[in-house]
Amino acid sequence: MSASRRRTRREVCRDMAVRTATSIDQGKGDERPWVGRSIERVEDAALLSGRGRFIDDLGVQPATLHAAILRSPHAHADILAIDTEAAMRLPGVAVILTGRQVKAVTSSLVVGVKAPVECWPIAIDRVRYVGEPVAVVVATDRARAEDALELISVEYRPRGVIVDPLGALAPEAPLLHDGFPRNLASDRTFRYGNPEQAFADAPHRFSIDVKYPRNSCTPIETYGVIASHDAAEDAFDILANFQGPFSIHTVIARALKVPGNRLRLRTPPDSGGSFGVKQGVFSYIVLIAAAARVAGRPVKWIEDRLEHLTASVSATNRATTLSAAVAADGRILALDWDQVEDCGAHLRAPEPATLYRMHGNMTGAYDIRHVRIHNRVVVTNKTPTGLNRGFGGPQVYFALERLVQRIAIGLGLDPLEVIRRNLVPANAFPYRTATGALLDSGNYQEAIASAVEQGQLAELRARRDEARAHGRLYGIGFTAVVEPSVSNMGYITTVLTAAERRKAGPKNGAQATATVGLDPVGSVTVHVASVPQGQGHRTVLSQVVADVFGLEPKDVRVNAEIDTTKDAWSIASGNYASRFAAAVAGTAKLAAERVAGRLARIAASQLNVEPADIVFAKGFIASRHNPENRIAFSRVAALGHWSPGSLPDDVGQTIRETMFWTPPELTSPDDEDRINSSLCHGFIFDFCGVEIDRTTLETRIDRYVTMHDCGTILHPGMVDGQIRGGFAQALGATLYEEYAYADDGSFLTGTLADYLLPTTTEVPEPQIIHMETPSPFTPLGAKGVGEGNCMSTPVCVANAVADALGLADVTLPLVPARLAELVRGAEPPPPSGRSTARPARQGDRRLCGEGQAFVKGAPEQVWAMLLDPATLQSVIPGCQRVDKISETHFRADVTLGIGPVTGRYRADVELFDPDPPRGVTLRGAADGALGFGSAQGRITLAPDGKGGTHLTYSYDAAIGGKVASIGGRLLNGATRAIIGQFFAALARKAGGVAAGRFSRFAWLTKLADLFGGRR
């Protein structure tokens, strides 16, 4: 594109002041187009009054059954036996499926790389992560199905566990799949330009090691599936809150062993958020559909919150080493990426897409021509990964922008100046990156200058200087990122070599679909194959189409539900990769313009003017030069229904137009592995000031400024809402959220008490600044928006924290305990001779404790009670039965509740080192649907001098599985309570008194320990 055309496009763009999402543009008497106004959202009336129609609100067919899923408590174990007989006897249970039954009616899910590996929606003979489905109970209602889960007995043989992606590559690491030697699913190296020479010639080399943690998006609504199977047709009808991409439709059909035309996949009218996560529901679609086939009746399954945190998809965690060859003035000459991607236990399609979605953008907003990339994908004993907001961007930009700050510090330069010196030149657009992306439009220098001025950076720097002069910890961070949107369906094939791609056939494009229809009274209806998750699709589409037809948005009805049997769609359909504004809304505009062109020819023949003279305005079709020469839009629009024979011969039908659009810029990877992985590229420049409390090391954001160029803004209020939402989510990833696993693979953050999400009280108001440089590649000039702050904010805040504390390395999330360790070092040991409680640490699930009780009765009497099964059954909390296997071996069935988790456990307890009646050591293990554990304890009995017994006990226990995920604080408190209940009940049985001494201060202290702040 010529420089003159670039100048013209920028001239018609405008810098926009900070917009607010609170003002509603009613547009009465306004001649401006509807696009670009903040009109009231048509979705809000129903959603804000509780009339949304989510999947769990919708009615089901008569005789619909309900499913509950038994999940593995182990991260890695062989399944030796599954006994479902007792569960099947429970009234209301219709069918129970285990891995073998599911395997008999399905095929393996598609694995993301070519390898002799299978991937099933349920464990087949072996579990590989905590929460993996082991059995599905289908019953008349959910409660009965969950009751039946507790009656299923599973015998496991644990295997070795690996949760660290770098450790997974070690020769001695436990192997998850035989088809992935050394747990390595993919290993590819890429080279662009001449990075070796650039590094050899550069005067400076800087490197950084980053371990980006796992986190997730936790939408307010969890997964939901309602599936039925028509045995006569061998066809499935499935309703699910799936978001796309609908390439997964093919994966589901293949797994269910039916052709695509026998899989009807529908979506509900409303969805309670997704942010990428609901792509992962597809494995449960297969599982519940298989259950419907076996049961012969419709089956409904709604995921609960504990299931969602433990076993739905999360973002990948990634280990990155990034090096840069740098000139003396701070210009980056080359980059060398070494990335190890952890995709969890199974490499489900579309993974390893998270690693490759950013492949064309590995140089970010910078003009860097030499790049080397080494990509490895590993499997570990963690939940499989999938789409999450930002999708690969947070992992890339955290490393790149931390390195930019490292370069600035190393060279004694201003970090902002290093950013400026490396930006893509303003006159270079469209700009082809070294790795293949085609950056469509922008002026990064102008955007930064505008943000610096409007965001008052000079004042913020003065504030930092003043704070530091008073001894406070204050820092400023910067980041500049390119936000890709409208993914190229071919980017994932970059994981293949060029030869493998030629053999597999080409894959590319980003096909969008829209249908515009006119009914017999001239009303307009729009349908798109993009499932809204709260973004306001219906509002924006009504604006876009109303502008084409000269109507008001209220005259346009929009349907965004998808039914693959009846609606137009393609594999790229869905709501992901920020493709709505750029691709879907643009396609609706093109479809409407086609219809409008035909209506213009009809009206021109009736008004005796040329079609070029026709305009659509205020509900009429009129002559541009004689506005009084007009006809009602509805009359012309209805003509195709009532009098098709009167239409001009060259017009064709006017009732409905379906448009398929894909941009020509999105091609397959070339033979040198260059890939334009996304169509549009917005620009974000952020800076922030943070202050860190010297005592608590809590991080407080003092000011946050975010500049966005997302092309043409269709609805300013909703754009700002998307930015605020992305910022809030990013703040969670920065300061609070992490999917934490113990060394044995137990999930440690399985409730919202331990997986902390920011609330409105923790999220400051960002200053949002806009600049518009329309994309030349999209019909409306729009680019994606909403994911960018998930890419920019974590590293911006991290850079500010590093600046405040003078740290070279920081790791997310920036919780006070982590910062304290970086700043102050490890906590020193206590002074000798002092008794201290063993500290609870994240990843440490050993529970230790001690206590005492006073029992009426001699030690001999208490000793006999401890060995009597009937007595034990009556005093063990939740005990159903105790069997005496031998004099020193007991078995018990116990139901215990800890917080929101209640489950049935089978326990084996053996006695060792008996010293009757003075003491005994107990050693045991328990296993159940919700977890497992082992423990050892010592009980001592001594006369109290008053005819009674002073009983003391100590224990050391370890737990795993789902019960471990509810958090160390809750477990410690609950364990003490349960053991205390046991000895209190023993004392009562013997006619004794309360165990221990009551202290209000001690009681309050335990409550604080139970519900206290983050460790």
Image (spheres, rainbow, N blue to C red):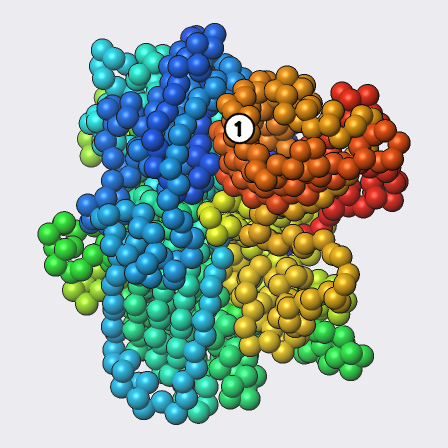
Q: Position of residue 1010 (x, y in %)?
A: 72, 43
Left or right placement of residue 36 versus residue 26 in this view? left
Left or right placement of residue 141 versus residue 168 in this view? right
Quarter the N terminus occupies: bottom left
Q: Position of residue 198 (x, y in %)?
A: 30, 85
Dot 1 alpha-carbon crowd within 10 angstroms: few under 14, some 14 to 19, many 20 or more:
some
Find disc 1 in the rendering and name its residue. Answer: 889
Quarter the C terminus occupies: bottom right
Residue at point 19% right, 63% down?
670
Depth order, front residue of 390/156: 156
Residue 843 in sight here = yes
Depth order, front residue of 188/977: 977
Compared to 175, does 614 lie above or below?
above
Residue 663 in sight here = no
Compared to 261, does 834 lie above or below?
below
Residue at point 48% right, 77% down?
404
Compared to 466, does 373 lie above or below?
above
Residue at point 55% right, 52% down?
843
Depth order, front residue of 556/760: 760
Q: Quadrant of residue 165?
A: bottom left
Q: Amino acid at mark 1?
A: His
The secondary element bearing badge 1 is classed as strand
Residue at point 61% right, 45% down?
956
